Every structure is written in C-alpha cells, then in structure tokens.
C-alpha cells in the first residue's frame, strides 16, 4: 500500500505562485511515475503534469506549460508542483497520483494510488 499526502494549497491572487508537495509513504517511491491532476467544480478531473522515476522526463498539459514545473526528490519520497503566474482558471482541487509503470501517462486510469487533494483558489 502507498499513502500520498498533498500540501501547499491555498488562496492566492492572480499572477501569484504556490508550491504543492506530495509526500509518499509505504511501498517504494523511487521507481514510479508521479502525476498531478486537478478537478474544478462541475468539471472532470484533468491531467496537469507527470514526471518519470529519475526526474529527467516530464510532461505537461498545454494549459500549464511554461507556468508549472514538476519535480521530485526521491530521497524525501516527495514530488512537487511549482505553480507560477497563476490564473483564476487554475482554481481546482489538485491531486497527486502514483503509477508503477515507467511510461509517462496523462490518463487518470493508469495511476494506481491517489492523494486526498489540496484546494488551490486563485482570485482575480
């Protein structure tokens, strides 16, 4: 079993920044793909970013490319999402997820474990 706990969400003005963290415990974290997803009220959960086990390969949704950066620290069993130039449309609950596959995936169905989510609210 794996437990994922997100933190770092909050209320920020448009143009501001937040850094989300996701701490993993339980089974090994190192050789996993990690992803961030988000879900706004009334909308489906959508892919935000993913990172492979080494951190050398990343992938982003077009809507966040150039503004968000995903990274990981395997020694700390933690994955991060640095969010800059935030927009009101970034408002959502953000979830981290773990995939034991080595392939980066944008599909939520491919991820094996999920955190409980952290709320990000961007005011205009």
Image (spheres, rainbow, N blue to C red):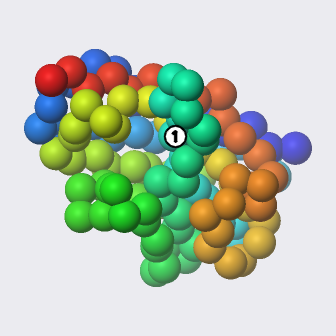
Left or right, 25 with respect to 120, comes to right
Q: How many labels, in total? A: 1
- Front-most of residues 76 and 19: 19
Vertical comparison of 76 with 7: above or below: below
Residue extending farthest to the left is 15
Identify the secondary structure beneath mark 1: strand
Residue 60 at least partly seen = yes
10 Å crowding of disc 1: few (<14), some (14-19), many (20+): many
| Residue 4 percent location from the top left of the image | 67, 38
The residue lying at 48 percent from left, 59 percent from top is 49
Q: Dividing the image into 4 quarters, which one contains the N terminus?
A: top right
The residue lying at 45 percent from left, 23 percent from top is 119
Residue 28 at least partly seen = no
Vertical comparison of 28 with 1: above or below: below
The residue lying at 64 percent from left, 68 percent from top is 105
* The quadrant where residue 3 appears: top right
Q: Dividing the image into 4 quarters, which one contains the C terminus?
A: top left
Vertical comparison of 40 with 64: above or below: above
| Residue 89 percent location from the top left of the image | 31, 36
| Residue 120 percent location from the top left of the image | 38, 27
The residue lying at 16 percent from left, 45 percent from top is 85
Residue extending farthest to the front is 42
Left or right, 115 with respect to 21, comes to right
- Front-most of residues 109 and 6: 109
- Which residue position holds label 1? 38
| Residue 26 percent location from the top left of the image | 79, 44
């Amino acid at each position: 079993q794996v437990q994922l706990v997100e933190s770092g969400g909050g209320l920020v003005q448009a143009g501001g920044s937040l850094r989300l963290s996701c701490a993993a415990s339980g089974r090994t974290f190192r050789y996993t793909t990690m992803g961030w997803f988000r879900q706004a009220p009334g909308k489906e959960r959508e892919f935000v970013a993913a990172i492979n086990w080494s951190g050398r390969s990343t992938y982003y949704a077009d809507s966040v490319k150039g503004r968000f950066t995903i990274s990981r620290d395997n020694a700390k069993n933690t994955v991060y999402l640095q969010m800059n130039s935030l927009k009101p449309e970034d408002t959502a609950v953000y979830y981290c997820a773990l995939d034991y596959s080595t392939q980066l995936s944008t599909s939520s169905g491919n991820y094996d474990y999920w955190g409980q989510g952290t709320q990000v609210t961007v005011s205009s």
